[in-house]
Structures are given as C-alpha cells and as structure tokens.
Image (spheres, coloured by chain):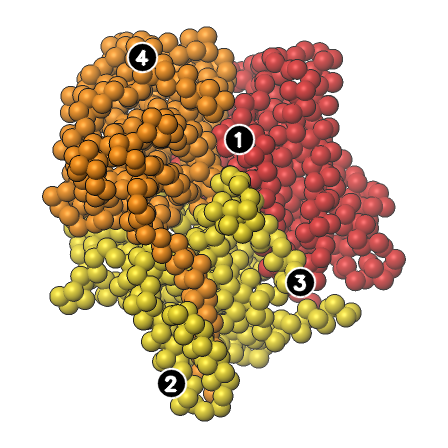
Chain colours: A orange, B yellow, C red
Amino acid sequence: MPTLRFAVRALACAVLAVTVAACSHGGRSQRSSSGKTIVIGIDLPLSGADASVGESTRDGMLLAVEQARSAGLPDGYTLRVETLDDAVQGVHSPQQGAANVRRFAADPAVLAVLGPYNSNVAAAEIPIANAAQLALVSPSAVADGLTVGPTAEELRRANPGLNTFFRLCATDTRQGSAAARFAIEKGWKRAYIIDDNETYGLDLARVFEHDYRALGGVVVGHDHIEAGTQDFKALLTKVAGTRPQVVFYGGTTSTGGGLIRQQMAAAGLDSVPFLGGDGIPDIAQAIGAAADGTYYTIAAPDVLRLPQARAFVTQYERRFKSPVGPYSANGYAAAEVVVHAIEAAILRGGGAMPSRADVVSAIAATRDLPTPVGPVSFDAAGDLRHPIVSLYEIVHGTPQFIEQFAIQR
Amino acid sequence: MIYLLIGIAVVATIVAGSMRSRALSRGVAIGALGLLAAVPLAVHDDATINLLADAGLYVILALGLNVVVGFAGLLDLGYAAFFAIGAYTYGMLASPQFGIHVPFWLLLFVAALLAALFGTVLGAPTLRLRGDYLAIVTLGFGEIVPQIFQNLTKYTGGPNGISALDIPRLGPYSFGLSATPYYEVTVALVALTILLVCNLRASRLGRAWTAIREDELAAKHAGIDTTRTKLAAFALGASFSGLAGVVFAAKLSLVSPDLFQFQVSVLIVSMLVLGGMGNVAGVIVGSLVLSTVNEAILPQADTLAERLFHLRVDLTADHYFIYGAILVAIMLLRPEGLLPNRERRAELHASADA
Amino acid sequence: MHEFVAQLINGISLGAIYALVALGYTLVYGILELINFAHGDVSTFGAFVALAVLEALGVHGALHGITLVVVSFLACGGAALSCAVVNAGIERLAYRPLRNAPRLAPLITAIGVSFILENVMQLWRGPAPVPVPGFFPNLVLTAGGMTVTLQQIVLVGMTIAATIVLQLVVKRTRLGMAMRAVAQDREAAALVGIDVNAVIAATFVIAGLLAGIAGFASSMYYQSTWFLNGFDAGLKAFTAAVLGGIGNLGGAVLGGFLIGIIEALATWQIGGQWSNVAVFAILVGVLVVRPSGLLGESVPEKV
C-alpha cells in the first residue's frame, strides 16, 4: 500500500538522520570533568547585526579571564573559556540561547556562564540555569522583569529559593529615572519620546515617560520606530510640529539613534537636545559632528574617576587594538565577578573542585569588588547594589561628564 | 554501540518498507517509532535531546509547508506567521499574561484550529494571484504577523514577548525543564504528521492539489473547485505549523517576535527545496539536514574547522556566508533536491535533453 | 496642510530610492521571471563602493561647484560599475545553471547569494552602521513655507532621468527590442537568432548599474550605510514593483513613489512601527482588486 510504504520510508529517513545528529553531538559530552580545569561559558550574539556589541563585550570578558590565568588560580586550577553564539542568522535568538545554556548545563566542567547580552534571551535562559543551579551573569540584560516581580519568580520555579542570575548593569528603571531627573533639572519641560520598539528601548522610554510626567514634565508625543529604518524625515517633521524642548530616545545607535540625531537638523531640530540611555554612547563615532548636543546616561561611575576603569581601557586597547565597546567594561566586570567567586569557592572548599552551587553563593556574597564599573555587590535578586548612573554630554565630538546620580530603588 | 544498533534498524526499516506485506510494513513503522522514542534512554545529554526535539519541530513545519508548496504548488514565503500564531496561542492562553491557564493538550487542538483559520483568512485574498505575486503577498504576511505581535504590547508583551509560560502536565506528572518529555511529544506529533500528510496525498484532495499544481486552468475545467482546494491547502498546511508552535513555545517557555522573522520562513522553504519538494521522505531528510546545519554545525564552525581541517580560525562572523554558500552550492549541484519525486526528475532531465 | 505637504516631500524622496531599486527588480523579473532577492544587497554594495570612492578621494565635508559634480560622478560611476560587474557575475555563476530548474531553485539561490553578500559587507565595514561623509552642501529651496533640500531634488531628478534613459533603451534600441523579445517568449527569441544568454547578461548588467546608482543615492541622502539595509529596502522595492505591475517599468517607478509616500504618511499618522504593516496591507488590497498590479496588463491566459 503506497501510503504506508511512504510513511515507513519517511520514518526510516527520520531515524537515520536522528542518528547522524545524535552522533555529531553526543561525542562532545563524553568528556568528564577532568582534574583541575574549570570551564566558564560565554553566551553572546556574535554574528550578524548584534555582533558589533557582542564581540566587544566578549573581548572584555576574555581580557579578564586572560589576566586571571596569567595571575594563576589557587591550588593549581586552570580556567578555560567556551564561547557560544546565540545569534541565529544574524539575530539574537532566545531559542539558540536556551540551547546553548542547556549545552553548558550538560557539561559538568562548566561552573558559570557569562551572558547573555539581550533581555529576552535571558528570559529563556534563566529557567534552565536555575534548574541546573548554574550561575548566569549578564553584563547587559536590563529588563526589570528578569529579577523583580511575578514573572521573575516564575522564571525561578525550578528552585524557587535560589537565584542564579546576576547582572552588572543598572536596570532600565534606574537609567530612565536618572534621565528624567536630569531633563527636569535642565528645565526641559516639553519632551518628545521616541523608542525603537525593542526590549531595551521600549522599557527605557516607558520608565522615562513615567518619571518625567511624575516630575511635572509634559510629554508632547511618544512614537515607536521600526528598528533598522533609515528614513526618519517623516517622523521628525511630525516631531518638529510639536516644538519639543528635548527629544528622548530609547534604543541604541544602530537601531536608529544615530540616524535620528543626524536627520534632526534637516527637520529644523538641530538646536533641540537629544537625550538617551546607555544605548547611544557610540553616537559620535557613528555620525560625527551631528552628535553634538546629545546627552546620555551610563550605568557606571565616570571612567576618569576610577583608576580601575582607566587601567581597563588602556589594557583593552593594547590587547585588542580597537576602542572599547559600550559594554566591554561590563563584560570585564562580569568575568571578574565570576573568577573571583570561583577562587573564593576553591579556597573555602580547601582546594576541592567547587560545585556550581558553591560558585553561585560565592557570587551572591560578592562585596564591593573593585571593577571598571565601580564596586560591585549584589542584592538578593541579583541586581547591583548602590548603582550609580552618570550623565554625559557630547561636546565637539567627545563625551564630557556632567553629573552623577545615585539611585535608590 | 547504540548507534550500530540504530544503523541496523534503519537498514532493516528501509528494506522492510519496500516489501509488499502490509503487516510487516506496519510492524516496522511501529518499531521505528519505538526506536526514536527510546533515544533518550541511550542519550543522556539534555542538550542533544533538545536539539533533536527542535529538529523534530522543523520536520513538522517542513511537512506542513510541503502541503502548501509541494502538493498544491502554492508558493508561500511567509510560513513562519502560522508558527508564530501557534506559539503565541500558547503564550497568551497558558501564562501569567492574562491569567488564563488552558492545558497544553487542549491548546494543541486550539492552536491547530486557529492556525487553520488564519491560513484560510490569509489565503483568501491570494486566490486570484499568480505564482510570484502570491509569493510576495505571503512574504508580506510573514512580515506583518510578527510585527503585529511586536506592536500590541498590552496583549502580546511587545518586543519582550511573554515569558515563564506554563509547564505542561500529563496527569500527575509535570514536564519540568528537561527536554525529554517535549522530545517524546514531538516524536508522536511527527509520526502523526507523516501519517496525515501521506493520507492526504493519496486522498481525493491530494489528487486535486496535484491537478491544480500542474495546470490550474485544466483542473478548473475538469470540475475541481479550485477555491476550496487552495484554501484547504493553506488551512491544513497552517494547522501543522500551529501544532509545532505550541510545543515550541512550551519547551522554550517563552514567545517573542524575533523568533519568527523572515529568516525562519526562508529556512523552512530551503528545507523543502533541499530535500525534494513534494516528496515526503525527501522533505524530512532536508529538514533534518538543514536544522542540523543551522543549530549544530554552524554554531560550532570554529571547533569543527579545528578538528577536521586543523585550522585555527575565528568563523563566528562568517556564519551567514557559510549558510548562504551551502544554499547556493546545493542548488547548483542538485536543484531537484536530495530525494526528488519522479515527476521532478523527469522534468529536469527532459529539459536537459532538449 | 503644511505638514501634509512636508510629509509628501519626504515620501517622494524616500520613494525615489525605492523606485530606483524597483526598476532593477522589475527588469530582471520581466526577462527571467526571477525574484532576485539579492538585488537589494547589490544596491547596498554599491553604497559601500561609493563610500570607498569618497574616502579614497579624501572627501570630508561639503563640496561645491565643479568639484561636487566630478566627485559625484566618480562615486556614482564607481558604484554603478562595480554593481554591474557583481550582478553579471551572480547571473553567470548562480542563476544561469538553474535557468531550467523548478521555480524555487533560483529563488533559494538568490536568497543564498543575498546572505553571502550581506556577510561580505559585514566583514568589509563591520556590523554597525557606517557614516558617509556629507559631501552635498546643505542648500535648501524654500517656497511658500515648504523646504526642499538640494539632495532631495537631485535624488528625484536622478530617478526620473534613469527611468527615461531606461525607457529609451528598452523601446528604441536593438538591445531593448531583444530584451522585450526574450521577455515575451524565450524559445521563440532563440529561434529568430537572438543570443538569449547575451541578452540576459546585458539585462543583469543594466540592473546592476541601476542598483549601483540607487546605492550611491542612498548613501548620499542618508549619509550612512549599513550592511543590512539591502534586505528591507529590497523587500519594499520589490513590493513596489509588484504594486505597479511587475515587468512594467513605469509601474515600478510609480509603485516606488507610492510606497514611499504611504510609508511617510503612515509614520506621520499612525506611528513608525505600523508603517510596514500599512505598506503590505495596501499591497494586498491592491492585488485583490487588481491582481496584475496598477499598471500591469491583464494578459489573458492562453490555454
């Protein structure tokens, strides 16, 4: 009977291919956790459009690990790094991120994972890391719901009392809040808000709008763009019609921040200040002189005030022959936290190979660890304690530090 | 060791599959199914099982698209839209989003029906369109649907999507976070899909599809209701996608618009073309090969290059290039696909002779 | 009203670029019935080449007079020529072997080529958007409260000029006649002695020139370029070609301008994140009512 024959043949092909796939993959996990090698996993978007930030973040992490390696770990342990890309066909993929973390979780030698970069990838990875009691330290996932709130609790339902997710960045709440305070301080009473309709930008803009209104500002318009659009003339003509005193942008330079600022002049808005979060610090490189008059927040104390930060920038540029990326310092700090925790766990265990749970508790116990993003301590939810937000203005193409905000939750 | 056994079983299956005896064929089919289901007993690596589960979902998607493109000859470039609809159905009806918690098993039906409904809705305006116009319109739908999900933040979570979706339960037993139960469900659904698709193909509807594909005008004059036949293709094709979407969402415990972009539609179409359009076995092979390439080989390109060619290169920036080169190479070397059906092979060789 | 006209101007400028890309698409489709997915990326490649030319010439800021004209010609010419070469190469290597294959094969190949091109460009200039020096002076024309920039005028002018030249080539030259013949019936054209391969190659060269010009125009107008621009622009441009009636040159241009205007007006009225939805919704609407597009001929199907 032809139908059944087809079906059977089809199934046979399925079994065959499954075998091939299982073969190509199964070989990897036969490795046992040999002796004294500790593996740190890195999960970042490293191909496609996100590669620009992914690579520089990874480089920051690698620098920290290399330095730790040359300094040597206690008791003869060595560190190895395994990097996986969570971008599929150029876009960060929560599905790939989850698969990567499963891979790390299945490898007993992996004691901690650095990453991911994006918040929605983190949402897919946290449950798996939580179930495996594997530490997941992100340099940049800023969505509030990852650590606080009912969703955050749901993400940890495998081990409800245990938090294995930590992040080295200020959440949107804090940056948006600082930006709103700054705007009101400067006397900008009418704001037009634009965001790129992506996870980071949308959240940031939402918080800014809320706090700005609460402080007495008037929001004359709030628009969402499609990330990757090139032509903003139509939008900016509309904005010009509302005569704002400041334009706030939630998003990054590449999703539209750079082009919007650049095209503001053509719409008659070149004297209007442009305010954003830590997604646009590279705007001067992207658009040159048109970037003047841009203000942005960075979720860290000023580089020039911290010797660690200055040293980091010098070392990074010497090692990688390129300027630091927007999250390189966060990546470096994340790696420092993990290395420090691993060392602490080794020492506490008297030289025995630490377990994943040991590393998690060591990370949670981090107290004022000096890093390029300031002294790091975590609260119970995995967020930074005492976060500092710094505000910069771009003058003649270079960022100038203006002011620092200390944010209480 | 286990691979040797599987290999023997595969050969036995292929041999037995060609035999006339119906009972033997049936037995072998059940045996093959049992073997697939037993894989997690031999392979304990959760990451591999996860990979296989994903591969299985792609098989279902490819088979569904094959109904539309391979059987009925309707060029659909926006198939990921139905996948998204299925996934978001689970995301919205089994999560903290609205506080509704419909059971997983019920949602499988609901999503299949919903996707079928949307398949009909999206197919309706395209009935009078010729080949490539149809392609562009379906491509447009493929772009619009995730965009709508991204924009309606209040209902769909916007670009963040909806996370922490319900974990499916089977009686007292909860699926948990291991990939194995999802894998088993996927295997069952794959078998179901293969059976349904093969039956559809042999049915009157299947023959009507073949007629439309070959010559629509002649089919119409032969009495076939082309409207209903085409809509049936869209609806049925989409329903498989809806099924896959639910399992996908449950396993990932998250839905987000950037999981369903144009690249996904392209990937599934490529699976069809690679495997041999119209041919069920070919499509399965094609989907398994490409999903392995995409999820296992490409992310590991550096390690593979080192192991196979002893080259220390950083290939992370080159994934797109490799994927594109593979597509082009396959098309140039074997455009009819790996396992073409008889008509396709005749088509190509005939024109080569001409 | 004031704002409406301003948005209209924005839309026309945007549409001019879509129109240029759509011309190339429709040209290739008319002759081969192939949706060349890589066309948008070829155009972006042109933008990259234009940038390279500008950098080689040491251009930093606005230029004037004869310098401006010469530099523009060099950059535009460089872009156009390199795209023509690339396009012809793609045709020869990737599409010609598949000329008799089932429809989907060259389509998949085109997608593969598109990925390859995008990756090449990413390796060339990195994954972030790249600034292009603004070498056009910021002159504006003001009339009745409306402002139009020099770039916008030049842009639209280029599009119109390209369309006219193309129409002349297709309608008045022997090559054009051969192209129309091959588009109508490839076998019959071969039978009357037309070298089909050469004609198709020539078509791709011309389409490549157009793509290069579009790339130059885009880099000049936006002062920025990005390796992924081609995908979105290509999609919209192809939509424009279909809207106008595929295979119809005038239709492609009309479609391009229409799509640009729709996008601008949609951004103005309902917000940027809905503009793509609006564009496709209109496309579907038009095709339901008029399946062959706005200017397409309803060719009765021969049985």
Residue C164, horizontal then vertical, whole percent? 74, 35
Whether residue C202 sits left or right of residue B36 in the image: it is: right
Q: Visible in this render: residue A325?
A: yes
- Residue B67 image point, x, y percent: 47, 68
In the rendered structure, which amino acid carries the disc numbered 1?
Answer: Gly
Q: Chain of mark 2?
A: B
Residue placed under numbered mark 4 in the picture: A307
**Distance from label 1 to label 2 (Cα)?**
56 Å
**Same-chain check, marks 4 and 3:** no
Residue on which disc 3 sits: C101
Q: Secondary structure at mark 2?
A: helix
* Occupied quadrant, residue A337: top left
Q: Residue A404 lies in what quarter of the image?
A: top left
- Residue A68 found in image quarter: top left
Amino acid type at circle 2 is Gly
Expressed as whole percent of the image width and height from the top left, the position of residue B313 reads 53, 40
Q: Which residue is mark 2?
A: B27
**How far, Cα to Cα, is label 3 from label 1?**
36 Å
Q: Which residue is label 1 attached to? A: C126
Expressed as whole percent of the image width and height from the top left, the position of residue A302 reads: 31, 13
Sort mark 3 into few (<14), some (14-19) or many (20+) by Cα contacts within 10 Å: many
- Name the residue nearer the viewer: C26 or A46: A46
